[in-house]
Image: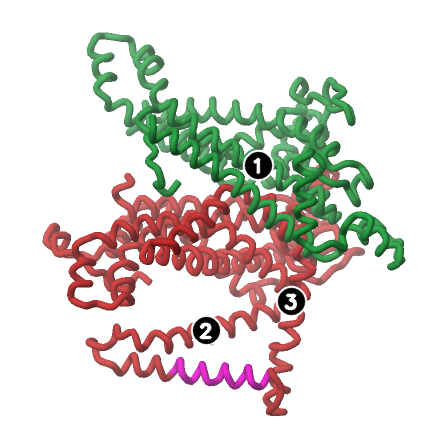
Chain colours: A red, B green
Amino acid sequence: MAGAAVALPDDTQEAGPPARSVWGQALRRLLRKRLALAALVLIGCFYFVGLFAPLLAPYDYRDTNVEELQFQGPSLAHPFGTDRIGRDLLTHVIWSARTTMIVTVATVVAGGLVLGVGLGLLAGYVGGKVDTAIMRTGEIFISLPGLPMLILINATMAPRAENGVGWLESHISSDTLQEALEARAGPEFVFLALLGALAVAGVAGLAAWLVAGEERRRGAWLTPFIAAAVVVTSLWAVQAIFATDGAADYFLIFGALSLFSWAGGARVIRSQVLAIRETEYVLAARAMGASTWRIVGSHLLPNVMPIIIVGLSAGLGGIAGSEVALTFLGVGVHEPTPSFGAMISRAASINLLEDYPHLLLAPGIVVALLIFSFNLLGDALNDVLTPRAR
Amino acid sequence: MQGLLGYVVQRLLWLPVVIIVVSFLAFTITRFGPGDPISVLGQNYRDDEVFERVRKERGLDKPFYEQYYIYMRDVLHGDFGESVSIYRGVEVWDIIWPRMLVSIQPGIVALVIAFSLGTAVGVFSALRQGTWMDPFAIGGFLLLQSIPVLVSLPFLVLIFVLKLGLLPATGWGGPSVDVGPQEIALGIFSKHIILPALALSLPGVAGIARLVRATTLAVLGEDYVRTARAKGLPELAVVGRHVVRNSLLPLVTVVGLSLVALIEGAFFTETILGIPGIGELGYRAATSRDYDVILALVLIIAFAFVVANLVIDIAYTFIDPRVRYERGSGR
């Protein structure tokens, strides 16, 4: 993302003797903030643990042993101790990191990038009735208290999401797809054939893009091919998520969170786009006959990018907190899928807290540190990328 | 004042639109969620014929939009339906409003703590700008801001209740008053208020402190502060009379955000400590599928929130005449 070519206005390049890109300067400023770097490393470790949870976890998170391992304190075999039914807490922390990882990434992509950035660009660039409709809808979502709405949605919709995901799972799981491939018939085979065609188109598009010279690389005709590649990759990722425990919960949580997290970002991006749209270099580009795609892609997007990054990073802590909060209230991820919210909720009852405080320590400290790191990073990026705000 | 009047009218007209959209969305979600209220009400009893009859009696067989119309008409008359699982057959409104009186108590105390502590920390760091104390004070509260209530509160309970024994073990108590449907306890006059008020207020301090710090720094550079210093006023008088009074104006805008934090935090303080307020009710309603109770809670909270924001926005234009709203300027 940082490698995107930034169209610098000429005067900035003349300003400092060694001409550096905007991103290079930002990176340099970020590297000077030691606390933010520590936060970044911590977040990186957290996501690494989440990504490789199946390999890193010492035990299976479903393993129970009530007789021998109930409420054990920290030991070498179980560094964080065990819980009421003898499950290893370290394993649960590791798998909970995966849950938080999936929800934050999915919400940032769906709510922040697709809905927030997409609708913000659309509203700002198209304007008129589209702008009014998007902004009014956003205003309604902003003027609502999020948590009660999220509780309502998750509490009432959970079984429906379960059904929907179950249906999808039975239709696009790798087993059924394999059967369809062998039988060469049925709707699944058609789906698979379409997917294959998309994949071929995506690869062909990518190859064409690489072969094409510098001149034509930005051509709009490539967009469908790149889009196809993106669709195929995300379908593959979705299929992988379906296969994991609690997929329905993930979808419900990030769907509901996305619904309530796009409006603020869209508003900021829209106002920025409105300002950039009227600048001379956009006017010049349009006068030279640049297409809409080119103006959006090479003039608007790079200039809005700092704001997008600042906005997304500022929202991360809140998203992670919401996932933990919803699960804590019993309307998020359900058993047996591990989540910090469920761990804390089990540990927080006063009887257990008195005798077994170690149940609370591990998940509590990890959640607090993670959200603190997200907030520190968000602050630092805000300082670094929007220098005027200082 | 023409522009301001137009702005107020515009915002007032926008209010019912938001309320209708929200209520429609919330109603749709509840009604299209699985397990209709009658089967929840029936608990283990299963008799389709009886269920069908009760459904007809309560108008649940009518078309969806008609149900919505009837529900909203009843709501406008103060009838939010009845509970189907937590307190079977009790009017939702009678359940909710005594609990609101309970939830408000820690909320008010937390608001007072957050704003006084936040202002003090903010002014302090602004006056100490450039020394180590400035980032230290704000950074400390930034850490507190990052700890969700559901994490900090169990730790507070562990320390103050279980280890030190300073505060009463969980629960709610205090002098009780009769408010109609039931008696409620005034925890505000007892030690029970301390833990929830602390847990609710600490996350908000950092935000308020940073805002106050920024505005105080801006005000410190103003000409009238230099004049006050130049005419030999003692520093305390300069800060108290000229700086603080002017740097507190923008705080009005964050009251709305604080209200959201308080309402959301109540779900956790009340669940963990067992305080009989609306947060605990919402938690139990969600887990026991008492849909009309959740629906009523969402509507009441959304309404209170929208009205509060409207009042704050309009009040701010009167408090700070520099703020001018133009017609049709986005918000």
Crowdedness near tag 3: few (<14), some (14–19) or many (≥20) residues, C-alpha within 10 Å: few
Q: Amino acid at mark 2?
A: Val
Q: Amino acid at mark 1?
A: Phe
Residue name at image x 66 percent, y 17 percent: B189
Q: Is residue A67 above or below residue B269?
A: below
Magenta extent: A188-203
Q: Nearer the viewer, mark 1 or mark 2?
A: 1
Q: Secondary structure at mark 3?
A: helix
- Alpha carbon of mark 1 to alpha carbon of mark 2: how far? 41 Å
Q: Earlier in the sequence, mark 2 or mark 3?
A: 3
Residue name at image x 57 percent, y 51 percent: A323
- On screen, residue A278 versus residue A166, left or right, reads left
Q: Residue A219's x, y, as percent?
A: 26, 75
Crowdedness near tag 1: few (<14), some (14–19) or many (≥20) residues, C-alpha within 10 Å: many
Q: Which residue in the protein does label 3 denote?
A: A164
Q: Residue A342's x, y, as percent?
A: 65, 50
- On screen, residue B204 versus residue B47, left or right, reads left
Q: Residue B219's x, y, as percent?
A: 29, 23
Circles 2 and 3, Cβ within 8 Å, touching? The answer is: no
Q: Nearer the viewer, residue A307 or A222?
A: A222
From the image, give the main secondary structure of the stretch colored magenta: helix
Q: Is residue A303 visible?
A: yes
Q: Amino acid at mark 3?
A: Gly
- On screen, residue B180 versus residue B14, left or right, reads right
Residue A231, numbered circle: 2
Residue name at image x 61 percent, y 27 percent: B106
Residue B303, numbered circle: 1
Crowdedness near tag 2: few (<14), some (14–19) or many (≥20) residues, C-alpha within 10 Å: some
Q: Residue B173's x, y, as percent?
A: 73, 23
Q: Secondary structure at mark 2?
A: helix
Please tell me whether residue A199 belongs to the stretch shown in magenta.
yes
